[in-house]
Amino acid sequence: MLLPPFCFLVALAVVRAAIAYAHRRGMLDQPGQRRSHTIPTPRGGGIGIVVAVLIGLPVIALDVVSAEHRLTLAAVWLGLACVALTGWWDDHRPLPIIPRLMAQTAAAGLLVLAMWTAGVPAWWLPLLLFVGVGSINLHNFMDGIDGLLAQQAMFVMAGLACLALALAQPAYGLAIAALAVGFATAGFWVYNRSPARIFMGDVGSGSLGFLVFAIGAMLWQIAPATCWPAAILCSAFFTDAGMTLLVRIWRGRRWYSAHREHLYQWMVRGGRSHGAVSGSYTAWNLLVCAPAAYAAWRMGAEGWMVFAVVYGVSLVVWMMLKRRCLRRARERKF
């Protein structure tokens, strides 16, 4: 199908226009103590991903998916528009945390309600809502250096597309949707790879978090065992963002404020380039997550065992690397 390459071209063109727009409007992220870049850089380039996907989803709904899934896909479209509009506003003029959370909850809730009307039991709804809002914020937290979130999203979407294709006809539309998101993200990555010419901004990071949740949740609705390989694909981000969040909450810090305490940020602060750090996360994805996700898919309902091993290993790796970064930081002070 030609839709994914079309989404790539749309995103490529819109991001190029977004660079000029950001310069005209003064939408520049300035270097600072809580940021990892060293020169003023435009933000808001994620609008290219959003525009491409918003164009592509109706095509999928009309030409690919069956009638019973169109309501859920319509909820994805509306939820994406809601998250993107909130992020676009925040990129222009920062919003307080409460309005942002309300918009994110509304977007995730709309999708969850659509899934409920399609047969998902009501007791799953609170957990799905929590995961949806969490995914939006998690991906926003992890958008802090050149290329990292874009490369992660391309990998995850490729993995979700493979899972959907393995399920054949019931999930074929989700495979096309995942590929469309992945190709659109690749169009943005052309301008975001190190050294970045534009940053994704909240319009893009929150939207990708919502789309990862949406496609993953819809796959789970069709085949519940896919939740294990899907979660494995996200292990690098879930571990880094989750552990950093827990540590900040434990220390009484505002979890939603800007900071440089994620592992990837400490690695940059330790002297590694943005490209090298992003490449390290990609190496984890390709060498660990990809084969582990395949193993979990092959094991079906027993895939939780692979999931547990991968997240156990990722936690140990995260703690070891974080301690190494902190030790080097203390040595440099003395």
Image (cartoon, helix red, strand yellow):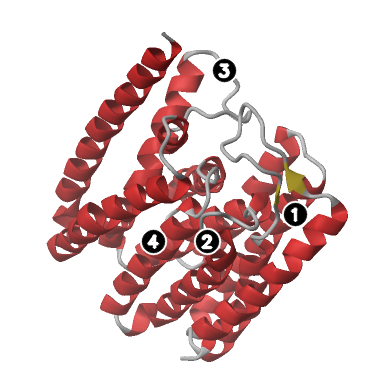
- Give the mark nearer the N terminus: 2 vs 4: 4
Secondary structure at numbered mark 2: helix
For the residues labelled 2 and 3, the Cα–Cα distance comes to 29 Å
Q: Nearer the viewer, mark 1 or mark 2?
A: 1
Q: Nearer the viewer, mark 2 or mark 3?
A: 3
Which residue reaches farthest right?
24
Name the amino acid type tagged 1: Trp
At a point 64% along the width and 47% down the height, the residue shown is: 104
Q: Which mark is residue 253?
A: 3
The residue that mark 2 highlights is 211
The residue that mark 1 highlights is 88
For the residues labelled 4 and 3, the Cα–Cα distance comes to 30 Å
**Callouts 1 and 2 close, C-beta under 8 Å:** no
In the image, residue 7 above or below residue 35: below
Name the amino acid type tagged 2: Leu
Task: Check the picture and name the quadrant holding the C terminus.
Answer: top left
Secondary structure at numbered mark 4: helix
Secondary structure at numbered mark 3: loop
Total marks shown come to 4
- Give the mark nearer the N terminus: 1 vs 2: 1
Q: Which mark is residue 133?
A: none
